[in-house]
Image (cartoon, grey):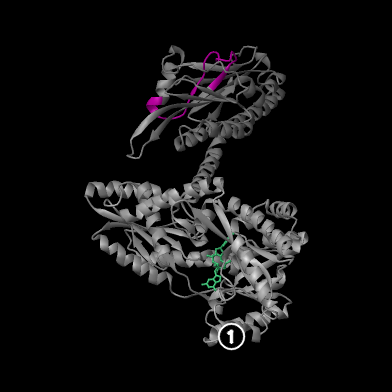
């Protein structure tokens, strides 16, 4: 009967988990061959009968109010223990008995309350075949299986043979849980009882009955083992639940609480501070340029770095404070019970210094910085959601201020955030009205001095602010995904322009177009490039797509596949800003590139800076030895150009040779240059 205990144990865990019970019941029932069905009676009324295929007659049976079941149910309730009720007839119309267990639930304060009954129903037919009672008859014995009624003490019949007992009887006890059952037998023919052969048969039968009894008993008692099994299972479930709960509230990489936990805990802290009239601070951290580390050194290094940062943060705060990871490279520190608001600034500075410590990650020394936005409850906002969104605004300001900085939130920053939102709206409008234009900067072959192509550079002609440079809107366009549409327009326009110059001037110039990370990952990129070439009539080899190192290093396999597909179209590929990322020379041979662009930051200090000169020289010779075209960006002075020529750099681009110009003026410039060159 402790199948009822088993069910009760599960209910105790989760009184509402009827689906879980249904599963458990279907798992347990086959183990209890003799148990016909299980019933749940919350508040004493049967509501559920398992399995669903069982007779549902008992549903609705009010055990505590039905005069037939009331006394025994109350007895079970009073003793708080399993009781066996033997109704004349079960509700499904067959004889049997019911093991009924009253379930009490204990609340957090240790108070117990009656939940209802968990019952198991056994059919007497099952007991009969289980106990092989028919064999008694074959041995010439009549039998009577009975018990003393728990309320009245009167014998109550469970099973009996059709032949009546005679006077000469013997009784064996069968140990059923909580109460002994009796099996009384007598010879069907009284005169033969004590004959020697009968005696031997009788002994055999009593032994068989005892064995049957033992089996019946085991059927009823095995549940004790099962209860243990269920307890073990429940413990396993508990730990599985605990681990599920842990996963739902923690970041598995760092072991810190995650966003769900932050929201929950921050609300609690706010509530606490509201009563205590105290203040707290929320620090939102975003690691600077973490993506490049991840992209260039691999995810394992990135993960190790995040774990190291998590540990550093833990070292900067008191035990009353809490650190969370929101995912990616974002962390939050909550400083509880903050004395002075300015203390948040000191802790933020401590964090900046701690995070910026150089670390040895996978045998490489890496230095990382972070930007921190700080908000204070209650002065900046009074609820968790607003605090977090204002901390984001402040963090964004810290980034804008040059990274490795902290910024307190201020209403002026909120204004800046609003402005960003407005800007995003205006960008959408600009896409609709095609308010972008491309300016073109000439690229010159250093050896011959001939213009060999141009780079297309995007501008936004704002109705009020005039011409806006890309640095002011491309990051937002990238963040909002609008860059994909803007970039597609730029690609088409640039291809058309290059082909029109060819028609106007008779010179086949190439055109370089910048691709953003989002565009590069766009599944439709290849199709868009193909369309732009087709519509403009520009031969593919005259289109050069500029991508950055970090774009290639983010999912390098996919990047290589995209690049190979672009190369198959015949398009040229250039690495922009070469030398500024976490350059890994290995990728130069791995990706199908044709051109390296030396970043302006190296060019601007040649030939005066020895270091930059060495770097520029090395990039040129590296590119040349790999058979790549090397382009120097940002050439402003003759001495820079001379240096580059001296070291064999192929192409130069910069204010010295021509500023970026709108299309009409660019053609004019080309004409003049051609005329000058004769
Ligand atoms: N100080 C100085 N600067 C020079 C000189 N020569 C060229 N520049 C500037 O250097 C930038 C070169 O472009 P970039 O490195 O590809 O850097 C570009 C590129 O990353 C991005 N960008 C421009 N157009 C597009 C576009 O159509 N799509 C995408 N995704 N990004 C673009 O915006 C960045 C900035 O573009 P711009 O403001 O036009 O700035 C351009 C150009 O005007 C020089 O001699 N001295």
Label 1 C-beta lies within 8 Å of the nearest ligand 1 atom: no
Query: For ligand 1, which image quadrant applies?
Result: bottom right
User: Could you say where residue 481 lies in the image, as x and y percent from the top left?
Assistant: 55, 51
Above or below residue 91? Residue 234 is below
- Residue 37 visible in this rendered orientation of the protein: yes
Q: Position of residue 620 (x, y in %)?
A: 65, 80
Where is mark 1, residue-wise?
614
- For mark 1, does the 10 Å Cα neighbourhood hold few (<14), some (14 to 19), or many (20 or more) residues? some
Residue 128, given in percent of the width and then of the height, sits at 64, 22
Q: Nearer the viewer, residue 98 or 342?
A: 342
Q: Secondary structure at mark 1?
A: helix
- Left or right placement of residue 393 versus residue 301 in this view: left
Quarter of the picture holding the C terminus: bottom right
Please say whether residue 168 is visible from this viewpoint: no
Would residue 93 be counted in the magenta stretch? Answer: yes
Residue 269, image x, y percentages: 31, 50
The number of numbered discs placed on residues in the rendered structure image is 1
Q: Viewer-proximal residue, 332 or 288?
A: 288
Q: Which residues are magenta?
A: 77-97
Specify the quadrant of the image occupied by residue 55: top right
* Left-right relation of 118 to 673: left
Query: Predominant secondary structure in magenta?
Result: loop
């Amino acid at each position: 009967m402790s199948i009822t205990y088993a069910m009760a144990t599960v209910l105790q865990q989760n009184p509402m988990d009827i689906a879980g019970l249904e599963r458990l019941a279907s798992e347990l029932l086959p183990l209890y061959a003799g148990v016909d069905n299980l019933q749940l009676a919350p508040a004493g009324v049967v509501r559920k009968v398992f399995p669903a295929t069982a007779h549902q007659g008992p549903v609705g049976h009010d055990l505590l109010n039905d005069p037939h079941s009331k006394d025994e149910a109350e007895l079970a309730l009073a003793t708080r223990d399993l009781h066996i009720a033997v109704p004349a007839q079960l509700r499904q119309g067959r004889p049997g008995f019911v093991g009924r267990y009253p379930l009490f639930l204990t609340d957090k304060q240790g108070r117990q309350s009656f939940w209802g009954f968990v019952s198991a129903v056994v059919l007497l037919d099952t007991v009969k075949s289980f106990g092989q009672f028919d064999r008694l008859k074959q041995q010439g014995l009549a039998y009577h299986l009975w018990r003393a009624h728990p309320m009245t003490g009167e014998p109550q019949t469970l099973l009996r043979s059709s032949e009546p007992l005679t006077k000469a009887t013997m009784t064996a006890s069968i140990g059923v849980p909580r109460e002994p059952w009796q099996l009384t037998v007598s010879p069907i023919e009284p005169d033969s009882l004590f004959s020697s052969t009968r005696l031997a048969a009788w002994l055999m039968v009593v032994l068989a009955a005892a064995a049957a009894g033992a089996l019946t008993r085991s059927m009823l008692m095995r549940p004790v083992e099962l209860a243990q099994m269920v307890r073990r299972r429940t413990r396993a479930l508990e730990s599985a639940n605990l681990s599920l709960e842990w996963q739902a509230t923690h970041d598995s990489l760092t072991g810190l609480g995650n966003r769900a936990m932050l929201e929950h805990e921050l609300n609690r802290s706010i509530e606490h501070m509201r009563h205590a009239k105290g203040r707290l601070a929320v620090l939102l951290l975003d690691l600077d340029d973490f993506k490049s580390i991840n992209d260039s050194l691999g995810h394992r290094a990135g993960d190790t770095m995040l774990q190291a940062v998590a540990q550093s943060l833990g070292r900067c705060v008191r035990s009353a404070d809490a650190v969370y990871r929101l995912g990616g490279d974002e962390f939050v520190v909550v400083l509880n019970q903050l004395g002075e608001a300015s203390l948040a600034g000191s802790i933020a500075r401590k964090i900046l210094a701690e995070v910026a410590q150089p670390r040895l990650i996978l045998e490489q020394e890496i230095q990382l910085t972070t930007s921190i936005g700080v908000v204070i409850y209650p002065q900046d906002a009074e609820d968790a959601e607003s605090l977090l969104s204002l901390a984001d605004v402040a963090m964004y300001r810290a980034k804008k201020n040059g990274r490795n900085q902290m910024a307190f939130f201020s209403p002026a920053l909120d204004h800046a955030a609003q402005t960003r939102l407005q800007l995003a709206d205006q960008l959408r409008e600009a896409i609709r009205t095609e308010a972008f234009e491309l300016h073109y900067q000439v690229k010159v072959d250093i050896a011959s001095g001939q213009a060999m192509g141009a780079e297309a550079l995007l501008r936004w002609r704002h109705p009020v602010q005039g011409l806006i440079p890309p640095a002011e809107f491309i990051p937002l366009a990238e963040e909002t995904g609008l860059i994909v549409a803007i970039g597609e327009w730029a690609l088409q326009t640039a291809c058309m322009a290059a082909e029109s110059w060819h028609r106007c001037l008779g010179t086949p110039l190439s055109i370089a177009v910048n691709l953003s990370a989002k565009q590069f990952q766009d599944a439709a990129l290849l199709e868009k490039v193909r369309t732009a070439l087709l519509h403009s009539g520009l031969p593919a080899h005259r289109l050069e797509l500029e991508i950055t190192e970090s774009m290639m290093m983010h999912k390098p396999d996919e990047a290589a596949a995209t690049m190979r597909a672009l190369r198959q179209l015949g398009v040229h590929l250039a690495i922009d800003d070469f030398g500024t990322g976490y350059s890994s020379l290995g990728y130069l041979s791995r990706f199908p590139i044709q051109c390296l662009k030396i970043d302006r930051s190296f060019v601007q200090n040649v030939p005066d800076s020895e270091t930059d000169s060495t770097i520029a020289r090395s990039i040129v010779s590296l590119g040349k030895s790999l058979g790549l075209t090397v382009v120097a960006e940002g050439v402003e002075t003759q001495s820079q150009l001379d240096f580059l020529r001296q070291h064999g750099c192929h192409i130069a681009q910069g204010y010295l040779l021509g500023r970026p110009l709108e299309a009409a003026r660019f053609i004019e410039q080309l004409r003049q240059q051609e005329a000058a060159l004769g």
